């Protein structure tokens, strides 16, 4: 397995261009299952999770050609199954469930199982499909769903589930009648998906709010659409500027998707100013410690919690970081402590007492965003840090060590 080796202490300066958003691309790719026509999607990031989705879709008979711009055709779906060996590597595979039941009237999708950051059930996805008239049974670790034609329904999500909202929006576009999603998630990736579906002829209103209304149609046509920039990648590089006492132009990002982070980073003393095509992000004269609480969009994103914790580890005071979305998203804490951070966990909160210096160490990545947190800590640590199991980071960051090297970091990938 490869590892990343970082010699810390370099301030980052220069331009970085943000790639297409992983969490926008995944549902847009599965939306192609809803039509027999060939869709064209651009700004697709080059990520392991995208390649896994291609494997999953090709396994169903879908044709996919291209790289950052692709042609994808689900004219013939030869099987409606998402097998365990693929789903276990990427739980977002659950996003084929809604489109397959809508298009084919059936689906057999492996239950994703838990992952490092939590149990991550899909009960809300299943209940919503049942509300729409699907028969859904669990057999041998698989979800087996059937419906001649889904019926529009009034759905209430107990939690604003992101992929749940996406899955049921895709199920509803071909249903008989109108579906209303109440307590829907409001992420920009959901707005991107709704725009793509509307481009295919779907009737959807309210995406981006907590009530989304979908009126079913009988068929959908091809879409030609672009993936929005990755707000989590952008946020990660913004924090990189702060933690390394540098200044970075973040190009191709959409600052409207980052308001919670921008406000929080300004509170730490950073300067964040709009420039042509993005944001100029500069470190402050000192790092003020701030409290952070993760909540569903438009609140502070859980996917940036590990990254801001690395930054607060060298803050000037005490920072309380509370994770409310996932039950076990502090896997990065023990690794940061090994680098000299002073962090104690109390229930769902991490108490971070800033220290003057972190020290390089041999550490291990445990999940995608924890990996980013460890790289950020390594960039500022004294000495050399070796991060193993970096296959986690390749799932969600396109060429991160190349982008960081271009900004002046001393970082390289070492083949094991
Ligand atoms: C999406 O995951 C993202 N993944 C996650 O990004 C992100 O952290 C998460 O939303 C929250 O923003 C993709 O978009 C592919 P949820 P998702 O359903 O949809 C509970 C990354 O690093 N829940 O919004 O799986 C669940 O356990 C990844 O890019 C149920 O209880 O998250 C969690 O506590 C990590 N039952 C909460 O809701 C359900 O049926 C939010 O989960 C569904 C969810």
Image (cartoon, helix red, strand yellow):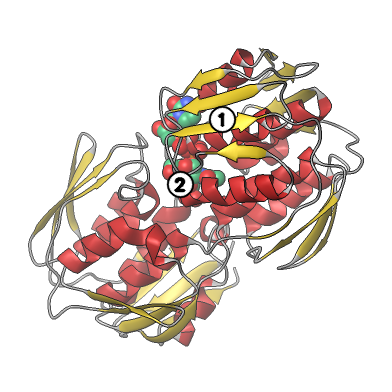
Q: In this view, does 362 lie to the left or right of 313?
A: right
- The quarter of the rendered structure image containing the C terminus is bottom right
Look at the numbered disc 2 and say if its residue's Cβ is closer than 8 Å to ligand 1. Answer: yes
- Quadrant in which residue 144 is drawn: top right
Residue at image mark 2: 187
Residue found at x 69% / y 39%: 202
Q: Where is residue 242 in the image (x, y as percent from the top left)?
A: 26, 74
Q: Which of marks 1 and 2 is nearer the N terminus?
A: 1
- Image check: 120 left or right of 259? right
**Within-10-Å neighbours for mark 1: few <14, some 14–19, many 20+:** some
Instruction: Say if 324 sits above or below 58 in the image.
Output: above
Q: On residue 8, which mark appears?
A: none
Give residue 172's quadrant in the image: top right
**Res 412 visible:** no
Residue 95: image x %, image y %? 64, 37
Q: Residue at x 34, y 75 (%)?
A: 379
């Amino acid at each position: 397995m490869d590892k990343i080796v970082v010699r810390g202490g370099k301030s980052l300066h220069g331009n970085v261009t943000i790639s297409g958003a992983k969490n926008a691309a995944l549902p847009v790719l599965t939306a192609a299952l809803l039509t027999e026509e060939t869709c064209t999607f651009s700004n697709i990031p080059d990520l392991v999770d995208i390649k896994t989705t291609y494997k999953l879709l090709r396994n169903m008979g879908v044709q996919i050609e291209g790289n950052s711009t692709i042609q994808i055709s689900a004219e013939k779906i030869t099987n409606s199954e998402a097998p365990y060996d693929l789903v276990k590597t990427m739980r977002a595979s659950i996003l084929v469930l809604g489109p397959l039941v809508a298009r084919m009237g059936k689906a057999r999708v492996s239950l994703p199982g838990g992952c490092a950051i939590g149990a991550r059930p899909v009960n809300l996805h299943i209940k919503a499909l049942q509300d729409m008239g699907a028969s859904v049974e669990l057999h041998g670790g698989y979800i087996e769903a059937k419906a001649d034609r889904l019926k529009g329904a009034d759905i209430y999500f107990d939690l604003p589930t992101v992929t749940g909202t996406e899955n049921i929006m895709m199920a509803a576009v071909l249903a008989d009648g109108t579906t209303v999603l109440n307590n829907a998630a409001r992420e920009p990736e959901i707005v991107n998906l709704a725009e793509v579906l509307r481009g295919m002829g779907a009737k959807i209103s309210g995406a981006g709010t907590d009530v989304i209304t979908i009126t079913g149609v009988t068929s959908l046509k091809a879409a030609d659409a672009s993936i929005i920039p990755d707000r989590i990648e952008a946020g990660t590089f913004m924090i990189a500027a702060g933690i390394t006492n540098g200044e970075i132009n973040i190009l191709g990002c959409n600052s409207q998707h980052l308001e919670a982070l921008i406000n929080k980073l300004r509170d730490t003393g950073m300067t964040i100013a709009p420039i042509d095509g993005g944001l100029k992000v500069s470190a402050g004269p000192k790092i003020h410690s701030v409290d952070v609480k993760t909540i569903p969009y438009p609140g502070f994103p859980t996917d940036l919690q590990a990254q801001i914790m690395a930054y607060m580890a060298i803050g000037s005071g005490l920072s309380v970081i509370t994770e409310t979305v996932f039950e076990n998203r502090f896997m990065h804490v023990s690794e940061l402590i090994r680098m000299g951070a002073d962090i104690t966990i109390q229930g769902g909160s991490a108490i971070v007492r800033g220290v003057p210096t972190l020290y390089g160490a041999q550490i291990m990545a445990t999940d995608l965003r924890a990996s980013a947190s460890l790289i950020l800590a390594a960039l500022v640590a004294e000495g050399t840090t070796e991060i193993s199991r970096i296959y986690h980071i390749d799932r969600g960051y396109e060429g991160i060590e190349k982008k960081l090297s271009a900004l002046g970091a001393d970082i390289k990938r070492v083949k094991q």
